[in-house]
Amino acid sequence: MDIRIQGPGPSAPFLGARDLFETERDLSLPVYVHLRDDPDERTWAGHYDDRHVLNISRQAASSAMARELALHEFSHMARYEESHPSHVQPIEEALYLALAGHRVERRRLTHCYQIANHAKDIYADDITLAIGPGEKLLAFLESSLATAIADHESTQPHQTAETTRLTAAADPNLTAVNAAFALALAERHDLLEADHRLYDLARIAAMDAPTVDLDAFVRQFRDLSHDPDVSSYRQTLVELTRAYVLGQPPGSTSEAELSTIRENRRGSQRGPNTGAD
């Protein structure tokens, strides 16, 4: 693997991740690591015809999770190079098929992108967790969920006219889906004991989102096919989207239905109505 670090900052986490990654995998294209000054810079990878780019803040690159973050992004790059359906299927197409004819708030549409990215992360971490240990990832998932559940504005539960929310600041529905993703990933790779705190956190998140079927989302994420084709993966994204936005149970969407939607809407460029002017 060809790693090219751009800008001053730590190099050991990326070189260490490369050495670990190369025990099982390799990348054909060079990886340019861009170290950013902004501590709030999100860690993300870009893919191009001649290279991959890993953007990460110097603060994150200096953290205890730096090597694991790099290893995770290398796994995304590997999935991209092998043209895995999870990394080449356009999310927009799946959202169009799932939500054609429905009016959807822009906020919920944004959530659908994050849910689709969870599916991508499952497939990337199938590589990550086959190469390296999962203890740090599990601690990260637990910490992230606990932070989402915590009241960012007050230490007291937030009272509404209808109920008492246990999660006051984060969107409760998306937090519940995020909890399902965390449980699914950990269960998929046998990282959890039966009494792990992640289960308690997930149940708290679910209590604040009664319209989200936590167990159904856990099953959908956990049981993703290890070797999907493009058609089956697209159908999975449609079902995840419909489960979140429309409350439809998994398994209620057929490929024949999706083919009918595509045929009826062929040539149309209209996606879901976001309610924006």
Image (cartoon, helix red, strand yellow):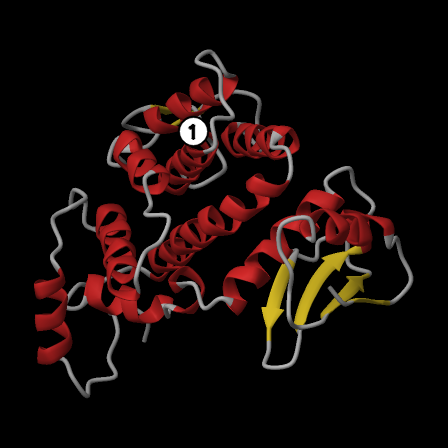
Percent position (x, y) of residue 2?
A: 76, 67
In this view, 93 is above or below 12: below
Residues 198 and 40: in front is 198
Horizontal side of residue 228 vs 123, given as left or right? left
Split into 4 quadrants, where in the image is the C terminus? bottom left
Residues 215 and 20: in front is 20
Residues 72 and 110: in front is 72
Horizontal side of residue 79 vs 67, given as left or right? left
Percent position (x, y) of residue 64?
A: 77, 37
Instruction: Report helix, strand or loop for mark 1.
Output: helix
Kindly give the residue lying farthest to the top in the view shown. 195
Percent position (x, y) of residue 40?
A: 71, 53
**Residue at 37% from the left image edge and 70% from the top image edge:** 90
**Residue at 28% from the left image edge and 30% from the top image edge:** 215
In this view, 218 is above or below 13: above
Kindly give the residue lying farthest to the right in the view shown. 8
Split into 4 quadrants, where in the image is the N terminus? bottom right
Q: Is residue 62 in view? A: yes
- Image quadrant in which you'd find residue 35: bottom right
**Residue at 69% from the left image edge and 53% from the top image edge:** 22
Pointer 1 residue: 187
* Residue type of the residue flagged with mark 1: Glu
Horizontal side of residue 251 vs 204, given as left or right? left
In this view, 244 is above or below 271: above
**Residue at 40% from the left image edge and 58% from the top image edge:** 113
Percent position (x, y) of residue 43?
A: 66, 56
